[in-house]
Each structure stands twice: as C-alpha cells, then as structure tokens.
Image (tube, helix red, strand yellow):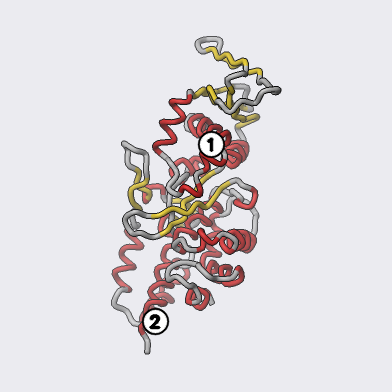
Amino acid sequence: MALQSLKKATQPGTLAGLTQPDIEKALQPYRLAIANALPTQDSPDRIIQIAAFKIATTPELAVCTAKSIVGCVLNASTLALNPALGHCHFVPRKNGKTNEMEASFQIDYKGMIDMARRSGRVAEISAEVVRDTDHFRVQYGTNRGIEHIPDLDNESDNFTYVYAVIKYIDGGTEFIVLTPAQVAKRRAVGGAKNPKYDFWEKWRAEMWKKTALHALLKMAPLTERQAAWMNTDGAVLSPNNFKRGMIQEETIVIDPDTGNQVEEEESAEVAEIREQIQDLGLDDLERYWNQGKAEWIKNAAITELFNNRKLELQKQQP
C-alpha cells in the first residue's frame, strides 16, 4: 500500500500531491521504527497522523525528499517532541549539491525546555532577552548571579543581552549570558537555508532564547538520549541515521570549522545490503527480504532501501 501511495506523488521521491491518507500509508513502513524510537507510551499511529497532517497542509514540505521527511518524523519520535505543539519544526531547504528540496529538523526553544525538564535533574529552566530599557546586572566570580528587572511599559526591540538559567533538583544553579555579537556569530554558523522559513526574522526573541539555551544545555547533565539532539538540531536526516529506534550520531558529519552538516555517511550494514540487492530481480529481492525480515524490519534505513529498490523494479516492468 505504501508503494502504491508513493506512485501517486506528482514529483518522484517526494510526497507532493498526496492526500493525508496517502501520506499516512506512505509512512506506514516506518511504523515499527517509530514505535521503537518513542521513549514514551505514545502511539506510532498518532505520530504518523500528526506528521501526515503537517505535510499535507504544508506544500513546501511535501516537495521535500521523502527520506528527509521520514528522518524528521523518526527524530521527533526519538526525542519525544511534538511538532503539533511547536516543540520542533520540519523546515524545507534546498540542497545545493543535488538541487533537491530537503526537510531539516529544527528544535524550538520550547522543545529544549521540555527535554531538559524530562531529564529528571532540572527543577527550573528559563531563558529571557534583555532590552535596552531594562535594568540588568550580571556578576561572576564566587558570588555569581543575575539581576534583571524588565521595563514592562516599554518593550523595546533592541536586545542588549540574552541569558538562560538552570536550577537543578539538588540545588545547584548554572547560567549563561550572551551578547548580541555572540548571538550573531552563532546565527551565522546555523543560518536559515530558506528565507521563507527564517525563524530569526519571524520569531527573533524566541531564536535568541534558543541560542542561549543551546549554549547552556551543552554543559548540562542530560541523559544520553536527550543529548543526541545536539547533533540533530538543524540537520537533514534520513532513515539511514537511525537503527533500532536510536539516532546514529556517527552518521551525521559536521564540519568542525563551520559547525554545518556536510554529508551523511551510510552505515556499513546498509551499504553492504545496497550492494547485494543492486542486481536482484523482483522475485529474488522478495526472497532476500524474507530471509532477514525479522531483523531488518526494525531498521528504517533498510526498510526504505528495499522499498525503493522494489519500486524501481516495478517501474521497469512493461
């Protein structure tokens, strides 16, 4: 049913032109992978419905490669972030090398706060921008602290600082303060790839807060699963980046100088299977799939690999 739904797409390799029910069918092969990724008791069918609605109602997203959309869905599931609640976003952007549209995964500052609270170690977490008419004082050294009294009668658009604060359950406190220059430097590294989805222009205060939270949470004692988002925020993912419901961070290659994602490495297991099925016909492909189905169906990258090869072979038939 998934292959039949993908055939209806007006643009090969995407979900363009599909109705919400067809998109749900196209995502069904990844149901088990989504279920394995979910750290909560949430339903994979509900995740698929939420994602399908978002894709069906966002034409720019529907023309993105199907594998990048699935990557976003799997990562949202892995991190238990709900795009319908604004915890994360699937952002279309153009790949300059392939000229294809891809969906990148973006975490909202609300999602960061939610993840930190779920760690079980954080009592309070917040981020605030400081405007030029506010009273603001920060002190470092042995008596560290922040004093911020906002000018509620004059909400200026001129931000002078942004800060984030964490209070731990054990009583400890950490904070970070960033200047406009420090925020601008971080924005330049992870700048928007699609002007229509430039969150820095649409939600400036929220992006400043996210920047401060991102910097602070790098020092926070989050769980291994929650810390995984550090490499996936802003990345273009595919099922190949996941195995048994967990993100394989080693497959996401980041340029150490710019902090930008430069490529996606294929795991050795997927690369080997890709080579082995390249010359198989439909019948042999089906037999090969059935041999390892019990294990492979848990791996979204392998499932996609077989589905795509099957679709190629079906198109070659007279």
Q: Earlier in the sequence, mark 2 or mark 1?
A: 1
**Where the N terminus falls, by quadrant?**
bottom right
- Secondary structure at badge 2 equals helix
On the image, the x and y values in percent for residue 29 come to 51, 69
Q: Which residue is mark 1?
A: 207
On the image, the x and y values in percent for residue 45 come to 62, 63
Which residue: 58% across, 54% down? 38
On the image, the x and y values in percent for residue 157 come to 58, 28
The amino acid at mark 2 is: Lys
Q: Residues within 10 Å of mark 2 (few under 14, many from 20)?
A: few
- Secondary structure at badge 1 equals helix
**Where the C terminus falls, by quadrant?**
bottom left
Residue at the right extreme, as displayed: 153
Q: Is residue 48 visible?
A: no
Residue 94 left/right relative to 76: left
Q: Which residue is more in the foreground, 98 or 202?
A: 202
Which residue: 29% across, 77% down? 279
**Residue 255 sits in quarter:** top left
Q: Which residue is mark 2?
A: 315
